[in-house]
Image: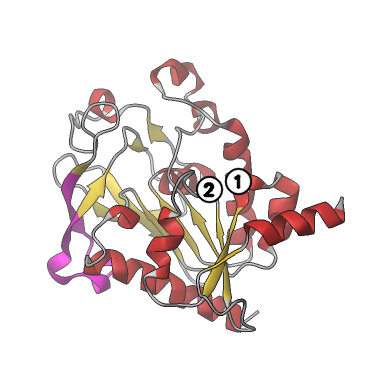
Amino acid sequence: MRRLYLFLVAIIMVSCTSNGKKPHELTIAISKERKNEKKYSDWLARQQVSFQFIDMSLLSVQDALSALDRCDALVLTGGNDIYPEIYGKGNDSLRCGEFDRTRDSLEQALFTKASSEAMPILGICRGLQMINVCESGSLFIDLPEDNGSGQIHRQGEEGWTMHQLAIEPNTLLSSLVANNTAWVASNHHQGIDRTGSSLKALAICPDDSLIEAIGWKQPENKGFLLGVQWHPEWMDANDTFSAAIAKTFLAEAQKFHQNR
C-alpha cells in the first residue's frame, strides 16, 4: 500500500519548470485542479517561481494529509456547492447545485491541518467559502434570492461576469492595487452570509455589499491566509492585481519552506 501511495504521488506531482525537481523547489497542494486544464497551477507558474504541485483530489483523505507534510502552501480551489448541513442550513439543500461530500471532507481536513501548522493558504471562490465554513461562518444558499444580487456574480447558470471590488484600506489587498479598487472575474451563486468569528472582510462588492475577500482577524502567530470570492486565475495574463496575488502567495510559500 505504501508503494502504491508513493507511486501515485510521483505521477501527480507535476514540475512547473523543465529542469526537474530542485532542492529548493516549492511544493504546492492544490485541493482540486480542473479536469482538462491546469488553470490554477498555470496561473501561479506565470510568476516564474520553481514549484511542483499535488492534486489532492486524487488521494484519499489520509494520504492527502500525509502528502501535505511535504507541501509549502495550500490552494483551496473553486467547484461544487458545499453541503449546507455543514454550516447549519441543511434544510435548504434543494436550492443548491451539485455536491461532492468527499471533497468537502477532504478540504475541511486539509484546511484544519494547514492552518494549525501556519502554512500559507489561498482560497479561491468555493475555497473562500470553505475557509469561512471551517471557521464557523455560514453562506447564502443563493445570492440572487437571498441577497438580492441579481446577476452581479453570475449570468444565468454558468455565465461569467465582471464586477468591481471595494477594498478595505490598510490591508494585504490594498497594498496590491491602486486606489483600493479593482475589476474581477466572477462566476458563483453562493457567498458569505455570516463571517467566521476568526475572520475579517478585506473587500466587498459595492453593488450588493457581498464580502469578496477574507483574512485572519488577528493574524499574529498564524500563517498567511487569503480567501477571494472571484477567480484571479481566469483574469488576463497581464492583469497586475491577479499577478500580485499569485506573487505574494508564492513568496509566503517560500518563507514557509525556508523556515521548516
- x and y percentages locating residue 73 in the rendered image: 55, 66
Residue that label 1 marks = 57
* Front position in the image: 190 or 208: 190
Q: Position of residue 127 (x, y in %)?
A: 45, 48
- In the image, taking residue 199 as reference, residue 19 lies left or right, namely right
Q: Nearer the viewer, residue 140 or 189?
A: 189
Is the C terminus in the top left, top right, bottom left or bottom right quadrant?
A: bottom right
Please give the range of residues in magenta.
Answer: 162-183
Inspect the image, locate mark 2, and give the three-letter code of the amino acid beneath it.
Answer: Lys
Q: Are marks 1 and 2 in contact (CB under 8 Å)?
A: yes
Location of residue 43 in the rendering, given as x and y in whole percent from the top left corner: 38, 62
Residue at horizontal 46%, vertical 20%? Answer: 93
What percent of the width, then of the height, locates residue 205? 20, 47
Residue 157, visible in the rendered structure:
yes
Give left or right: position of 42 versus 165: right
- Could you tell me if residue 217 is visible in this image? no
The residue shown at (28%, 30%) is 143
Q: Residues within 10 Å of mark 2 (few under 14, many from 20)?
A: many
Say which residue appears at 44% left-offset and 50% top-offset.
Answer: 37
